[in-house]
Image (cartoon, rainbow, N blue to C red):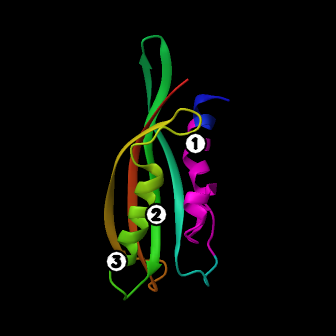
Amino acid sequence: MTKYVSAQSDIEGVFATPAWTANSVSTYPVNFKVPASVSEFVKVEFLPLNTNSDYSRFGISGLAIVQIYVSANIGTRRLMEIADLLDSILQNKTLENGTQTQSSSLQILGQDKDNPNLFRGDYQVNFTFYN
């Protein structure tokens, strides 16, 4: 596989593992339209931002952004719980194809402008991949 496909497969692959699926949080790609009936879900976005070379290795680094959507008007606790679940599978890990992740951050964005019944936060983790 190429560097882009390998790193993307690593990031997206964690959402197919039992560690994630056991939590019953629906997961969609960032460019997928989510059915209006779903009130709690995440969207996964893979952003390769830079190319790297190090000791004759070549790779990429970037951000994995997981958009977290929960029901509005219930506070931020559920958003934080999902961010903690994401930490357990993404933060400071070496993934199957060798992608390495670093520490995470969470940005609370508030009520979703497209659907006011949803509340949104963005979980971000940096990654590096060398082929």
Magenta region, residue range: 7-34
Q: State the residue at coordinates (45%, 68%).
A: 68
**Mark 1 sits on what residue?**
10
Q: Residues within 10 Å of mark 3 (few under 14, many from 20)?
A: few
Q: Residues within 10 Å of mark 2 (few under 14, many from 20)?
A: many
Q: Quadrant of residue 118?
A: bottom left
Q: Residue lying furthest bottom in this view?
A: 73
- Which of the pair 9/89 is nearer the observer? 89
Q: Provide the secondary structure element on which disc 3 rests.
A: helix
**Mark 3 sits on what residue?**
77
**If you read the primary sequence from the N terminus, does the residue marked by circle 3 or circle 2 appear first?**
2
Query: Is 111 positioned to the left or the right of 35 in the image?
Result: left
Query: Percent position (x, y) of residue 21?
Result: 60, 64
The amino acid marked with disc number 1 is Asp
**If you read the primary sequence from the N terminus, does the residue marked by circle 1 or circle 3 appear first?**
1
Identify whether 105 is placed above or below 27.
Answer: above
Query: Percent position (x, y) of residue 16?
Result: 64, 56
Q: Quadrant of the N terminus?
A: top right
**If you read the primary sequence from the N terminus, does the residue marked by circle 2 or circle 1 appear first?**
1
Query: Percent position (x, y) of residue 113?
Result: 42, 77
Inter-mark Cα distance, 1 to 3: 28 Å
Q: State the residue at coordinates (34%, 69%).
A: 109
Q: Is residue 31 visible?
A: yes
Query: Percent position (x, y) of residue 24?
Result: 58, 72
The amino acid marked with disc number 3 is Arg
**Mark 2 sits on what residue?**
67
Magenta span contains residue 30 = yes
Q: Quadrant of residue 19?
A: bottom right
The amino acid marked with disc number 2 is Gln
Q: State the residue at coordinates (31%, 62%).
A: 107
Q: State the residue at coordinates (38%, 67%).
A: 121
Inter-mark Cα distance, 2 to 1: 18 Å
